[in-house]
Amino acid sequence: MSSEKGKRSRSSDKGKASQSPEPADPPTLRVAEIVSALSQALDFGSGSPPWHSVRTCILGMRLAAELRLGTEQQNHLYYALLLKDAGWTVNPAGENRRDIFAIRCERGGTLARLMRLPEQTAQSIACISERWNGQGNAQGLARDQIPIASRIILAAQTLDMFAITFGPEPAMRVLVENTGLWFDPTVVKAARSLEKRGRLWKGLEEPKLLAQAVSLEPHPTVVSDSDATLDAICQAFATIVDAKSPFTFYHSNGVANAAVAIARKLGLDNSRVLFVRHAALLHDIGKMAIPNEILQKSTELTRAEWQTVHAHPAHTYRILNSIRGFGELSEVAASHHERLNGTGYYRGLTADQLSIEARILIVADVFDALMAKRPYREGMAREVVLQLIRSKTPEQFDPDCVAALESSGIGGDQSYIDLHTVQAQLGAAAGRRR
Ligand SMILES: [Fe+2]
Ligand SMILES: [Fe+2]
């Protein structure tokens, strides 16, 4: 993972003239903080209690220290603990339970690789369903064949899940009773030792969980807003969100591609184009809180179901806003269902409260959503979609953004475009302007 001094250009002004100068002291973006905060979305996706991934990370790092794992091993373990449920949004149809576990574990590993995390981290995630006695659900590995990180993750996540539901004592009993079956005896011994000294369960309450998890990263990694690692993390979480439903597959990619096309046409600075891309990739992360039954429902939603759907930008805001340096990004990302005349949700913002970046995202989101097939209707042709958007412009949509969308020629492109390609396009455009 790359490591450099963090820097994010920001424009916190409301309204259209939001291409403001750089702040005097830009915040540092900590990768640990970004991944820890985004792991809240994985808790939604796996049906786990809030902050389960972060608490599992804290417990697992305590076990690793007790087992005297080396710093490098601890670093691989750290991100594996936070991302252990990354593959959980995949719902393979028609597979048996063992196959579903294997597919989800493998996908978790693939997503870790997409985030440019070390291979050991990806392998550790791919093996979290293995059991000490070889009766696991994935590859049937046993004992030392299972990476030590995976053995620690299994113990840590079990401790947290049982402690949240039944309390610490029953949680430890599950570990002890399954020693040598599910769990590595040395890991269980470490957990008992920590518990006896009062160091296992200490400080696992909100509100300081996030800060505590961040402080446990062995090699603190910081990134800038143009760093490939940051882009890869946004891309991976976009993939996780989109996997929730076959009907939204690639939606975040589609929104990001449309938003970048509009931003480039409007002549935004390169750093702002990347900012818009990241906001677009993460805009629907709050959708992880919406149950699949609602997302995939082909009939009319009930009033209560609509309320759940309408709350997703608020979840997007809460998750992203817990990351230092993501203040403006959380505002823009959470504004994607707002409308200039105040008829949108979830805050009913009006034109003077919506920055140019938010306006771009609003148009990009509706464009991709209308172009794509949904459970209740087929996808639409580009000209039909543009006609629909035009009919609500300028009341709901920014006319400059709509004109930029039209002239960009983009047509529902949901393909994965990596940062290198985007930067090459931005470089070429800058060259043409000179
Ligand atoms: Fe949305
Ligand atoms: Fe969306």
Image (cartoon, rainbow, N blue to C red):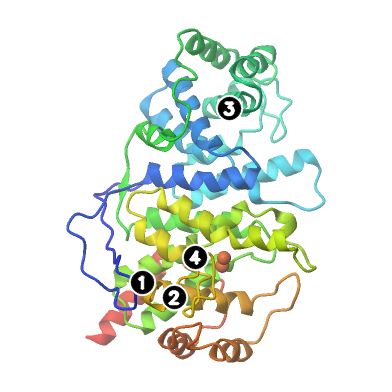
Q: How many marks?
A: 4
Q: Nearer the viewer, mark 3 or mark 4?
A: 4
User: Considering the numbered disc 1 on the image, is that residue within a helix, a strand or a loop?
Assistant: helix
Q: Quadrant of ligand 2?
A: bottom right
Q: Nearer the viewer, mark 2 or mark 3?
A: 2
Q: Earlier in the sequence, mark 1 or mark 2?
A: 1
Q: CA distance from mark 4 to mark 1?
A: 25 Å
Q: Residues within 10 Å of mark 2 (few under 14, many from 20)?
A: some
The residue beneath circle 3 is 160
Inspect the image, locate mark 2, and give the three-letter code of the amino acid beneath it.
Thr
Q: Which mark is residue 350?
A: 2
Q: CA distance from mark 2 to mark 3?
A: 43 Å
Q: CA distance from mark 1 to mark 2?
A: 23 Å
Q: Position of residue 131 (x, y in %)?
A: 67, 25
Q: Which mark is residue 273?
A: 1
Residue visible at 37% across and 76% down in the picture? 352
